[in-house]
Image (spheres, helix red, strand yellow):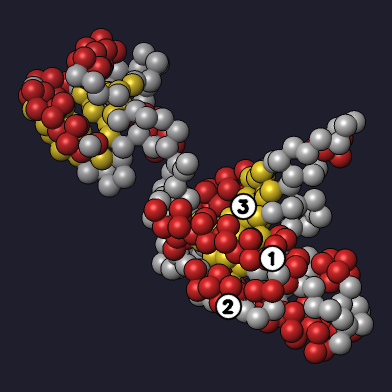
Amino acid sequence: MSHISCDIFLIHLFFTWFYCCDRMALIETVQKERTRYLCISDFLQISWDKVRREMIEEKDLSPEIVDRLGEYIRLNGGLAVLEHLCNDSLVSQNTMAMEALSDLKLLHSYLEIFGVADKVTFDLGLARGLDYYTGVIYEAVLLRGPEEPHNVPDNDTDKIAGFGSIAAGGRYDDLVGMFDSKGRKVPCVGISIGIERILSMAERKAEESFKNIRTTETQVLVASAQPHYLEERMRLITALWSSGIKAEMLHKKNPKLLSQLQYCEKTGIPLVAIIGEQELRDGVVKLRDVTTREEVNIPREDLIKEIQKRTS
């Protein structure tokens, strides 16, 4: 199991239980299938006022029924929402809804054990656009940034409206059986991940913070400011390799110093060890911080410790 937050962006998971929402929508004066499809609205992007107006004006439902339904699908939050539903007079009469809530409570207890309960919201307004789900459905969305709280306050979906979904899925026990000649039931749980959106957001975050995404694990580039120092670069890089330092150098015999520095900036290598005539004479190596461009002369015998200290 992976943690659901990362350094690039914060992820928030939204859960609901399809059958639970389906059964709670069965207010007696509303036909089941009609109500069910009306509820398939992306509540993270559409306001309740728009959904309500569509139900009344386009689907000819009475305002009283719509408002009653709205009391449920606008609920979202943590364990308190589940407790509220368990004590609801309408929900508590439905066996399937209570079973779904029991499962969600169990899920919440597991989330608490893993320390991620504050990153999950149970949202009754959540729905999927396809009708083959038979149990829990879920969606992962990007929060606006590290300054945003992990748990979204009840009925405050604006907090997550900025970026939208990056992954979604759910339980579908009957889908595979539709293609089985014997109609066997095959329980399934699946998820789809928006790779392009994730990469796009990672790129944007990197641009905003003026940081390059590292494409290498190299800790230091061995460089020279003058020509004819290929052998010296080879000797230095061999010493670094022998000490477990991840180092590399450009393959050209006499690369320009600017090209070597630009290579570090492009690939995200944090340090440059520069040697030349003066450094060899003084028994030092010039160590350059690629980000700050600060340069210091380090005695040759202290170079490995200095690189380890800066990259640890």
In the depicted structure, whether residue 145 falls above or below residue 252? below
Disc marking residue 87: 2
In the depicted structure, whether residue 51 falls above or below residue 239? below
Instruction: State yes or no: discs 2 and 3 in contact (Cβ < 8 Å).
Output: no
Q: Quadrant of residue 47?
A: bottom right
Q: Which residue is mark 3?
A: 166
Report helix, strand or loop for mark 3.
strand
Across and down, in percent, residue 148 comes to 45, 68
* Residue at 29 percent of width and 29 percent of height: 220
* Residue at 25 percent of width and 17 percent of height: 241
Residue 169 in the figure: left or right of residue 288:
right
* Residue at 52 percent of width and 55 percent of height: 107
- Residue 32 shows up from this direction: yes
Upstream in sequence: badge 2 or badge 1 = 2
Amino acid type at mark 2: Asn
Report helix, strand or loop for mark 1.
helix
